[in-house]
Amino acid sequence: MNCDNCKKEDPWLEIIGKNFICKRCVQQHKEMGLVYRTHIDTFHFLIRKLKPEDFEAYMDITREQIEEHADLKKAGIKFPTTNVVSLE
């Protein structure tokens, strides 16, 4: 089957809303891509809970929405932080 986003053929596609998406396109989302690579069951749980309508809605998922539905620290998933503090 072909990915609805990049149109490349892939034997294993994820269903995100109404789109069939390959693993390369799933990993374009920084946080959800990390969850997909490390804990596929948690990724499927988040997709069921967040219910994105299509790939564009999937790309609009925020870190706060992810952390609202799943305890990622308990699962051992650590997001890189964007807050950098320089100590003098």
Image: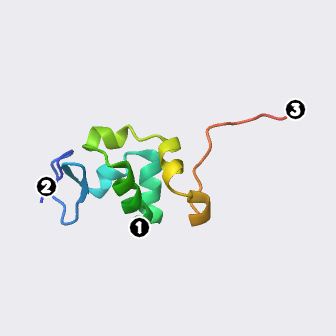
Looking at the image, which residue is at 19% across and 49% down?
Answer: 19
Q: Tell us which disc is closer to us: 2 or 3.
A: 2
> What x and y, as percent, mark residue 46?
41, 55
Occupied quadrant, residue 87:
top right
First-in-chain label (2 vs 3): 2
Figure quadrant of the N terminus: bottom left
The residue at the far right in this view is 88
First-in-chain label (3 vs 1): 1
Occupied quadrant, residue 48:
bottom left
Q: Nearer the viewer, residue 44 or 39?
A: 44
Rounded to the nearest angstrom, the CA distance separating label 3 from label 1 is 43 Å
Secondary structure of residue under mark 3? loop
Secondary structure of residue under mark 1? helix
Q: Is residue 83 above or below residue 8?
A: above
Q: Label 3 sits on what residue type?
A: Glu
> What x and y, as percent, mark residue 71?
56, 58
Rounded to the nearest angstrom, the CA distance separating label 2 from label 3 is 53 Å
Pointer 3 residue: 88
Q: Residues within 10 Å of mark 3 (few under 14, many from 20)?
A: few
Q: Residues within 10 Å of mark 2 (few under 14, many from 20)?
A: some
Pointer 1 residue: 41
The residue at the far left in this view is 1
Q: In the drawing, what numbered circle is on residue 2?
A: 2
